[in-house]
Image (cartoon, rainbow, N blue to C red):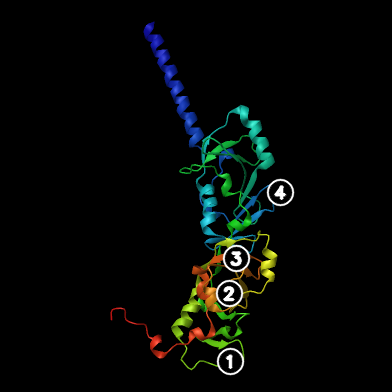
Amino acid sequence: MKRIIILVLLLIGLSAAAYYLIRENDQKGMVTADRGFSVPDLNEIKKIVIQQKKMQPIVFTRKGKGWIMNGKYPVDPGVFVNVEKVLTNVTLLYVPPAGHTNTIMESIKENGIQVDLYEDDDAPIKIFHIGTDLQKSAGTHMVMAGSAQPYVMYLPGLEGGLRSRFEQPAKNFRDKFIYQFPRNIIKSIKIEYPKDNFSSFILTKQGDKFELKPVLENIKIPTNPINEIRVNAFIDQFESMGTEGLIDAIPERDSIIKSLPCCILTLTTLEGKTHIHKYFSYDGYETSGINANTPAEIRALNRVFIYTNDDDLYTSQNRVVGDIFHGYSDFFSPKQDIIPKNKNK
């Protein structure tokens, strides 16, 4: 009899252990229809729509290896990668207690972020909602569209929640690069200094080279030869140049863009697109009385505003964009200066 009792208890124990292991495996490993938030291959996704309450949806469409936001703006890959990691690696942390379900669902209904994933232009293949982050541990409430069962999801290796990766203003997703123009697509670059017109110039593509001319007529042309090395270095910098980011929300925005700029840059591509950027002194915005009239004075600034013909206002440090501020005469030099000096001599 004792042997039978021992066998029964052992069987019960093994059954309980098996149930626990199966349940844990189901919660942490098995993907069911109402918890399948991730996608196996993000390359199959062609469009992502993020919609926050009381805000316009943000639409990301795939373009080559990158993404375009709202059909117009290139996306900053360093920011968008945070969204991509969630979509491919989000993992179940645990199933909330049944008694918490109604509260979680009400919170998601009031403040949830909806995410739609498309493989083409038809109906989305997946829709889910992101709720609040847990306060005392990593994890975020999430629920699939049409499901009544929320889950706590997390990203392995991430200490915090997931919501902030989607709860971003549109400007944060935008690429901070304002110049990505290889020399083979540039038709002309015109630099104007409203307070120093004698320094203004235009470079126009002529075959494999760029022809340098002053903007003002009847200006005295330097007798020294044009330094082609400087011309080429000037053109090549426009292949990749970034900013600190957009700052459209500052109260002084209108007064800044209506003031006389230090410099006006007009870049035209061979496709016929024209990009006009106006540069203003950020130093003068912070401290009055700072002169920034000549190229040398503009280069001496710490920071500038950049206003584009897309109605965007950026800031940038001059250590990044300062080489733009050349004057016409800066491209001329004595013949001996054209040949790079041998540093070993």
In terms of secondary structure, where does tag 4 sit? Answer: loop
| Pointer 4 residue | 54
Mark 2 and mark 1: span between their CA atoms? 22 Å
- Of the image marks 4 and 1, the number of the one nearer the N terminus: 4
Q: Position of residue 18 (x, y in %)?
A: 44, 25
Q: Are marks 2 and 1 in contact (CB under 8 Å)?
A: no
Left or right of 119, for residue 89: left
- Assess disc 4: are there few (<14), some (14-19) or many (≥20) residues with their C-alpha within 10 Å of its C-alpha: few
Instruction: Say which of marks 4 and 1 sits in front.
Output: 1
Residue closer to the observer: 268 or 193: 193
Quadrant hosting residue 112: top right
Residue at 51% x, 33% y is 27
- Of the image marks 2 and 1, the number of the one nearer the N terminus: 1
Mark 4 and mark 1: span between their CA atoms? 57 Å
Residue type for callout 1: Ile
- Assess disc 3: are there few (<14), some (14-19) or many (≥20) residues with their C-alpha within 10 Å of its C-alpha: few
* Above or below, 65 relative to 277: above
Instruction: Say which of marks 3 and 4 sits in front.
Output: 3
Q: Going by the picture, which residue comes out furthest to the left?
A: 345
What label does residue 292 carry, if any? 2
In terms of secondary structure, where does tag 1 sit? Answer: loop
- The quadrant of the picture occupied by the C terminus is bottom left
Left or right of 11, for residue 63: right
Residue closer to the observer: 275 or 13: 275
| Pointer 3 residue | 287
Instruction: Say which of marks 2 and 4 sits in front.
Output: 2
- Of the image marks 2 and 3, the number of the one nearer the N terminus: 3
| Pointer 1 residue | 219
- Assess disc 1: are there few (<14), some (14-19) or many (≥20) residues with their C-alpha within 10 Å of its C-alpha: few
Quadrant hosting residue 151: top right
* Above or below, 112 relative to 102: below
Instruction: Say which of marks 3 and 1 sits in front.
Output: 3
